[in-house]
Image: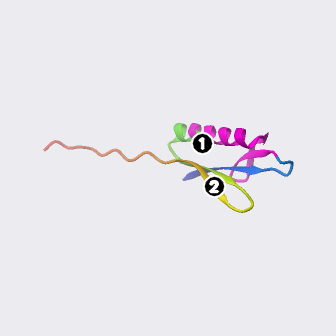
Amino acid sequence: MSVVFTIKEESNGLWGVYRDCELLIKQLTAAAAIKDGRELARLIHGQSGEAVTVALETPYSSILLARYARPAPMLKLVAA
């Protein structure tokens, strides 16, 4: 399973941080929304180990801001 945080501009010109369709934090500057979105992503990834993505969404495109991937599986070494 993967978690996606999206930074979107609100109708009043300020920005919000969303997880799926749920607005988590609102009325931020663009810089503050990006900072908070990345912090949330690091926190969720650190707690769950799940893959987390942060994207800035505009009317014209979506820009990937951060991706925290699942850790690589550990390999067991067997002595010969």
Mark 1: give few (<14), some (14-19) or many (20+) Cα within 10 Å: many
Looking at the image, what colour scheme do you see? rainbow
Q: Secondary structure at mark 2?
A: strand
Expressed as whole percent of the image width and height from the top left, the position of residue 19 reads 68, 48
Expressed as whole percent of the image width and height from the top left, the position of residue 73 reads 37, 47
Q: Residue furthest right?
A: 12
Give the residue displayed 67% in from the left and 38% down from the top. 36
Expressed as whole percent of the image width and height from the top left, the position of residue 50 reads 52, 46
Question: Which amino acid lies under the numbered mark 2 shown in the image of this protein?
Answer: Ile
- Depth-wise, is mark 2 or mark 1 nearer the camera? 2
Give the residue displayed 70% in from the left and 40% down from the top. 31
Q: Which mark sits nearer the N-terminus, 2 or 1?
A: 1
Q: Secondary structure at mark 1?
A: helix
Judging by the rendered image, the residue that carries numbered circle 1 is 41
Q: Describe residue 33's horizontal placement relative to residue 14 as left or right.
A: left
Among the 4 quarters of the image, the one containing residue 43: top right
Q: Describe residue 35's horizontal placement relative to residue 78 as left or right.
A: right
Among the 4 quarters of the image, the one containing residue 42: top right
